[in-house]
Image (cartoon, helix red, strand yellow):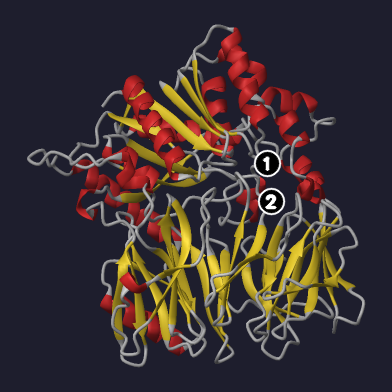
Amino acid sequence: MRHTSLANSICNVVLLSIIASPVMASEPLKRYDVRDFFGKPDRSFFRLSPDGKTLGFMQPYKRRENLHVVLLPPDGTAPDFNRARRLTEETERDIAGFFWKGNSHILYVKDFGGDENYHVVSVDVLSGKVKDLTPLPKIRASIVDDLRDDPDHVLVQHNKRDSKVFDVYRINVITGDSTLVAQNPGNITQWLTDHAGRVRIATTTDGVNTSLLSRSSEKDPFKTVLTTDFRTTVAPLFFTFDNKSLYALSNRGRDKTALVILDPDSGEESKPLFENPDVDLDGASFSHKRKVLTQANFNTWKEQRHFFDPETKALFARLQGKLPGYEVVIQNENLAEDMFIVAAYSDRTPGTRYVYSARSDTLTTLGEINPRIDPAHMATTQAVTYTTRDGLKINGYLTLPLNREARNLPVIVNPHGGPWSRDSWGFNPEIQFLANRGFAVFQINYRGSTGYGRAFWEKSFKQWGRTMQDDITDGVAWLIREGIADPKRVGIYGGSYGGYATLAGVTFTPDLYAAAVDYVGVANLFTFMKSIPPYWAPYLKMMHEMVGDPEKDKELLNASSPVFHADRIKTPLFVAQGTNDPRVNKNESDQMVEALRKRGVAVQYMVKENEGHGFHNEENQFDFYGAMEAFFSQYLGK
């Protein structure tokens, strides 16, 4: 088992070796076009049908990702993609992903212009007929259970009856007929089924306290099993294979989440089946066919696995042996669990996708995700740590441009969104794009980032613009002390909460950054709270605890909202926003731009009418990243 402390020690040594390494000045760095980084793959998102005979995948059609299928040869050789059939004609928005429903249908979700009002859509693989299973105005739908043992139905939740809460319906994927299975009394935020597809578990919240509800059958009423405050995690994952108990992630009585077995009648939990002393567990997996627990996942400086099942451990060992030097992920398998879609990637490439046949122990290439880019021309991402002014250890990632000595570099600080999420190691086209332009890129898992335990997360409460921002500022100071960053050429770029951190950075540390890009970021914490979607309402009290109450914490929110202190900003600023953003309303960006322009400060402002929380359409991404490159090049140089 590899622990964070050991990994961080190793990473710091590696970083020092990079800083001390000679500059590879003999070969000029190849400059790739913005389209090379952000253009759509020729083929991606490969998924096997349950019988393993047909391969579904995504391919651009009129610049949008659409569904295609192709038959797999019985001998395990590569499919003939020239004989693939296109099933959909979505031209307004990309299809983000899909899954097989039996061997005859494929399901996917779609929204409208980025509004996140998702509909569940069914496609008949043979006829190509497309049917919206939730054809209702202004609703948000999602899959509760794909009911893999029922060829005709799926469980879907949506908020037609009440925009604030979600009821569960059994929907026929052929006819679209819908039957109510579970009605939300008003406080349920999550539903969970057993292995027979029966809705047996629910999670409720009053805003700050979370309760776990259970029932023996769908005819029985739910009863409350346990109640915790929102700081405590008890997250049911799936039932044991006799449908009597639950596998769950829990941090009751500990700082880090561990995998336990939970009694749905008493709420009592077993001793941990597995835990990591340094980081939370992210989840667990099981074999549908063999009905065994297979692995638990966690993230130190990169994704790690703990195996419970020798067969799964041996499978990954075989794959790793065939794909040395790459991280390996199984993305999909057939029902027989003898054919697998395998992804191999690194920090320098999104990699290649394969079909692996366990019967013949053969790996067949399906395609590279981005053959336009040579991994040898991409930069290495290293894990680093530093200590904040109040003694907290912060983990992050540093990507240094190729062929440049790690001294006095222009640096772009890239705080992640969330804020209750985290950055991880792997290929990131934004990071590699900026590194290819000669910038070092610094990613920071500031306090509140998830995965590092409850105490680290709680340190972020009511700290927007305060100690959370100090963590970022202290990271920049560390880069300058190490001699890596040129103090006159430090920029900052982030999206969502990262956009807020960008605005806070140029507001509260106005001399630190030479240029800033705010991408769908929060500017005013009061209007941000008021404009949240109705289905976030059950979490509003929790948001008040974590961010601040607009009434009780008025002074705090005022002091932490960049828009009220725009007179401090002197850093050149570029703002990007989607008109249909339901999370960070366009009003947030409008307020900041207006406040600065009233002072005569020039602000570059990009608004896309057909986008929401981040730009997903290819042409908009090209515009945004091209403009961002020009902006940073103007103010940071290289």
Toward the top, the furthest residue is 600
Of 84 and 218, nearer the camera is 84
| Residue 585 x/y as whole percent | 67, 34
Structural crowding at the residue carrying mark 1, measured as other residues with C-alpha within 10 Å and reported as few (<14), some (14–19) or many (≥20): some
Which quarter of the picture shows residue 86?
A: bottom left
Looking at the picture, does residue 332 appear above or below residue 513?
Answer: below
Residue ID at (33%, 55%): 347
Quarter of the image containing the N terminus? bottom left
| Residue 318 x/y as whole percent | 32, 83
Looking at the picture, does residue 628 appear above or below residue 422?
Answer: above
Please indicate, yes or no, whether residue 89 appears anywhere in the rendered image: yes
Residue ID at (37%, 82%): 72
Of 92 and 435, nearer the camera is 92
Residue ID at (32%, 77%): 79
| Residue 38 x/y as whole percent | 37, 46
Left or right for 319, reference 206: left
| Residue 75 x/y as whole percent | 31, 90
Q: Earlier in the sequence, mark 2 or mark 1?
A: 2
Q: Quick one: SS at disc 2?
A: loop
Structural crowding at the residue carrying mark 2, measured as other residues with C-alpha within 10 Å and reported as few (<14), some (14–19) or many (≥20): some
Q: Which residue is mark 1?
A: 582
> Are the residues flagged by discs 2 and 1 in contact, CB closer than 8 Å?
yes
Residue ID at (26%, 34%): 438
Amino acid type, callout 2: Asn
Q: Quick one: SS at disc 1?
A: loop
Of 409 and 622, nearer the camera is 622
Amino acid type, callout 1: Pro
Please indicate, yes or no, whether residue 276 appears anywhere in the rendered image: no
Choose mark 2 or mark 1, whichever is in front: 2
Quarter of the image containing the C terminus? top left
Q: Which residue is mark 2?
A: 117
Left or right for 312, reference 344: right
